[in-house]
Image (tube, grey):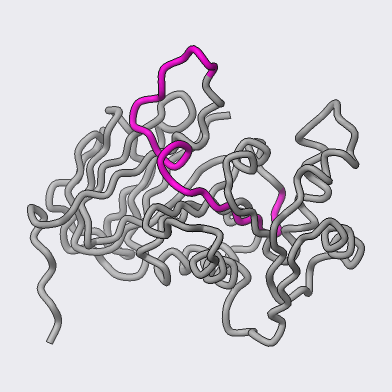
Amino acid sequence: MALAPTPPQQRPTMRHSSAFLLPPPSPSSSPAPGGGPADAATVALVVLNQPLPRFAPLLWSRAALRVCADGGANRVFDGMPELVQGQDAGEVRARYKPDVIKGDMDSVRPEVKEYYSNLGTKIVDESHDQDTTDLHKCISFIAKNSTVADKSNLCILVLGALGGRFDHEMGNINVLHIFPNINIILLSNDCLIFLLPRTHAHEIHVERSIEGPHCGLIPIGMPSTSTTTTGLRWNLDNTSMSYGGLISTSNITEEDKVTVTSASDLIWTISLQN
């Protein structure tokens, strides 16, 4: 027998923020409102095999653990010297050294793997496992890794998860549903996405200087029989959403805080400003 959904008034509130994308504050400035992974959570960074977004060096500096998924190591090796201009490429590569390279090792170049291995990067070959994606392998590793002490306050930022092959994108989105109790955020130069589990009510603090106004709520996996929001130009009021019917795309954030409650898991997406 299916369990009845938790009434909205009984759900705990989960708060979200993109403050990790804000520039580092000057010593005399006040903390940014809303907080977020940059100042409240343990941040782990996963790099997939797509071009690095412009903010990769910033997120690298904020991460306690940095994991490259197979060919993501090539992207760090090639891309970081391009993003950190005016500095010696060799020094940049040595400074931006991943802690771990993990995956089936069919994409990382041999010379890149050797370079990082010589610097002390841990190489984890899981070519025997062809049933899970490289992102899945990396999330599992981070969740079990003893160096990330506070799992309840863990935020995993994933670079290169969007763009490229559509089946890869869908596989990455599927990982959000496989690990609904871990705060995983997929990022590209253009947008970010994360899962809103139906077990919680959600407050999303909108960092207007870096994100929005375009946003969306998408019921991937199953229809939502009821979704209610505040803070959007076109709010939902106990609205049903499903593929083949209504989904909330090209919506607009109107307030600094967006609230969402839903009968099903939803994907939240918001545009990032250049």
Relative to 227, residue 111 above or below:
below
In the figure, residue 265 lies in which quadrant?
bottom left
Q: Is residue 268 magenta?
A: no
At x 46% / y 24%, what residue is drawn?
209
Depth check, front residue: 76 or 65 = 65
Q: Is residue 78 left or right of residue 174?
A: right
Q: Main secondary structure of the magenta part?
A: loop
The picture places residue 235, in percent across and down from the top left corner, at: 21, 40
Q: Residue at x 27, y 49 (%)?
A: 14
Q: Position of residue 172 (x, y in %)?
A: 53, 64
Percent coordinates x, y for residue 2 in the rendering: 14, 82
- As for residue 35 lying within the magenta part, the answer is yes
Q: Judge from the rendering whether residue 274 lies leftward or rightward of residue 230; answer left or right.
A: right
Where the N terminus falls, by quadrant?
bottom left
Q: Nearer the viewer, residue 90 or 273?
A: 90
Seen at 40% across and 61% down, the residue is 182
- Is 259 rendered above or below residue 165? above
Q: Residue furthest top?
A: 28
Above or below, 247 relative to 230: below
Q: Is residue 191 left or right of residue 228?
A: right
Q: Which residues are magenta?
A: 26-51
Where residue 21 sits: x, y (%)?
52, 34
Q: Residue at x 76, y 35 (%)?
A: 83
